[in-house]
Image (cartoon, rainbow, N blue to C red):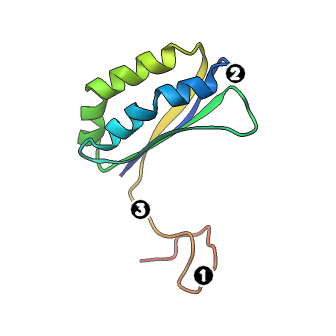
């Protein structure tokens, strides 16, 4: 599993328009093989900030996306809204488990074998 997470800051007067312009693009990207999640969303406390969250099954799926038309369209879409800063990283996840244990207690530690 690969996660993409981070922020993109744009002109605050254009943030909502950028997210709306990306609505169809988000839907189309989610149709790609290996895409589990793909979303841009507004930070409710920072008028310029867009959060980026993506989840991909594997490196091959992400590579196909980065070389495909939806990624190129995303670059153009966000570029049309005065990008002021980008901080986006990818994470390879080799272990995943629920936050809540079988008794419903939230756990920060990894408790499954």
Label 3: few (<14), some (14–19) or many (≥20) C-alpha neighbours in 10 Å:
few
Answer with mark 3 or mark 2, whichever residue precedes in sequence. Answer: 2
Locate residue 23, reporting x and y percent: 45, 34
Above/below status of 60 relative to 93: above
Q: How many marks?
A: 3
Q: Which residue lies furthest to the right in this view?
A: 45
Q: How far apart are marks 3 and 1 (CA)?
A: 20 Å
* Residue in the picture at 26% in, 26% down: 68
- Provide the secondary structure element on which disc 2 rests: loop
Q: Name the residue under label 3.
A: 95
| Mark identifier at residue 12 | 2
Q: For residue 8, what is the image quadrant?
A: top right
Give me the residue at 23% from left, 45% from top. Answer: 33
Residues 12 and 9: in front is 12
Give the image location of residue 105, x and y in percent. 63, 79
> Depth check: 73 or 106 in front?
73
Can you see residue 99? yes
Residue picked out by circle 1? 104
- Residue pictured at 45% horizontal, 19% vertical: 77
Residue 95 x %, y %: 41, 62
Does residue 4 appear in this view? no
Between circles 3 and 1, the one closer to the viewer is 1
Mark 3 to mark 2 CA distance (whole Å)? 37 Å
């Amino acid at each position: 599993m690969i996660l993409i997470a981070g922020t993109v800051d744009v002109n605050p007067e254009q943030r909502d328009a950028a997210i709306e312009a990306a609505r169809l693009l988000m839907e189309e990207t989610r149709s790609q093989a290996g895409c589990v999640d793909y979303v841009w969303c507004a930070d409710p406390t920072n008028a310029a900030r867009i959060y980026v969250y993506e989840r991909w099954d594997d490196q091959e799926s992400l590579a196909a996306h980065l070389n495909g038309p939806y990624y190129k369209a995303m670059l153009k879409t966000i570029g049309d809204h005065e990008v002021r800063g980008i901080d986006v990283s990818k994470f390879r996840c080799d272990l995943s488990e629920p936050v809540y244990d079988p008794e419903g207690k939230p756990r920060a530690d990894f408790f499954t074998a």
